[in-house]
Amino acid sequence: MADRKGGGQAGGVGAKIATYLEMTSPDQLRPADPVAGLALEPVAATNPLVRRLHDRIAMPHGWSSLAWSPRRWAEWLATAGWHWVVRVDGQDAGLVSMEERGEGEVAIAVFGLVPEFVGRGYGGYALTLAVRKAWNLPITPPARRIWLHTSTADHPHALPNYRRRGFRPYRTEIEPA
């Protein structure tokens, strides 16, 4: 996950602070209020929409994955097992991608909204739906830990949203540019 993000200025010139967060039980989820018209719809990794939405989400934050070669992108798609488009009233509003990391661990590798849907009250409920999906993925053994990370290069509402939903920080790192 850390290789997908980049940029930022916190923690020194060109550095960023990455915060890793986790949930170890489904009952730790503190759901946001439902938002009418918001849904997660599954999409195949081979659908070009996955890359298009990823890039629109990543662009304002300078994620390093924007510079991935087609080969590197294909390699990542082969490991990220599940993708959903966040839709609001039928419009593409964001993307959720998850990876199984073995031993019941699930990484939310991509979670975000495209710029025109940011700051409109969709993130909390979209994350609620994503976390519910993560806990119910068809993996063996069943999910026992859901984790993700964010950084100071991401939207300033990202970390507070993750914490409000019940994610707990377990590690922080200062990463050079």
Image: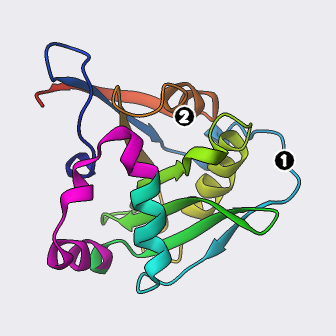
Q: Is residue 83 left or right of residue 128?
A: left
| Residue 69 among those drawn in magenta | yes
**Residue 155 seen by the camera:** yes
The type of residue carrying mark 1 is: Pro
Give the side of residue 31 with respect to residue 132, left or right: right
Instruction: Identify the residue at image location x=83%, y=40%.
Output: 33
Q: Name the magenta segment's main secondary structure.
A: helix
Which range of residues does the magenta coloring cover?
57-77
**Residue 176 lies in magenta, yes or no?**
no
Q: What residue appears at the point 24 percent right and 34 percent down from the top-left corner?
A: 7
Name the residue located 65 percent from the left edge and 42 percent from the top edge: 123
Between residues 41 and 63, which one lies in front from this camera angle?
A: 63
When the figure is inspected, residue 83 is found, relative to residue 66, above or below; the finding is below
**Quarter of the image where the C terminus is located:** top left
Of 24 and 100, which appears nearest the observer? Answer: 100
Badge 2 or badge 1: first in the primary sequence: 1
